[in-house]
Amino acid sequence: MRAFFRNVSPRRAIVDFWQVFTAPSDYRRVGLVMAAAVTGTLFTAMAMEGGTALPRPPEIIYFPSFIEDRSDAEILAENKAATAKARAEEAEEEARQERIRQMYKAVGDATGVETKRAYEEGKAEREAYRKKVEAARKEVLDKHLVDNPVYDAEMKKAQTEKP
């Protein structure tokens, strides 16, 4: 190992570099410009990447539904509003999908492709899926609403308000 380090010295490296650098050559300037361009491009690309700072800490979002002093009626009202909003969004998405299906049907009719059977099959599949989802929702609700005093009170209130 000592033999290796005996031949390596900073002084010898600088002298060797200076001899090569000062040697006359037709391509020395072109080589210098190209080396500077490549090095400058690499450093510019690294500078544009950023990454000099630590990543931002995560943002904490507190849910308003976890407020401790809410009454059961307030929770139930918020749940009803959220459910109505979600169902309205689902209905809007279904209407948008139906418009798209009607456009495809119009294109199929214009080009002579039979689309009625495919449309009916798709409609039947969507209806079966919707029934399956509703049955699963009902099962979950029935499972969690057994002996629920809030639910029972709301149902009695709704029944007394109907007539």
Image: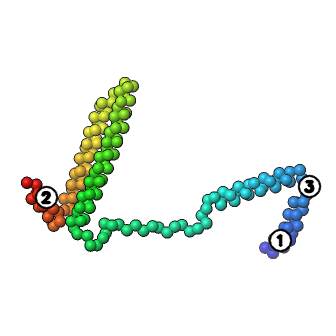
Question: Mark 3: few, some, or many residues within 10 Å (few <14, many ≥20)?
Answer: few
Helix, strand or loop for disc 2: helix
x and y, in percent, of residue 62 in the image: 37, 68
Question: Mark 1: few, some, or many residues within 10 Å (few <14, many ≥20)?
Answer: few
Residue furthest out toward the left: 163
Residue furthest out toward the bottom: 2
Describe residue 96's horizontal placement relative to residue 9 as left or right. Answer: left
State the colouring used for the structure image.
rainbow
**Residue at the disc numbered 3:** 24
Which callout, 3 or 2, points at the residue further toward the start of the chain?
A: 3
Amino acid on which disc 2 is placed: Ala
Amino acid on which disc 3 is placed: Pro
**Residue at the disc numbered 1:** 10
Residue furthest out toward the top: 112
Quarter residue 37 falls in: bottom right
Label 3 to label 1: alpha-carbon separation: 24 Å
Describe residue 42's horizontal placement relative to residue 89 as left or right. Answer: right
Helix, strand or loop for disc 1: helix
Which callout, 1 or 2, points at the residue further toward the start of the chain?
A: 1
Label of residue 158 in the image: 2
Residue under the image location 73 percent in, 57 percent down: 40
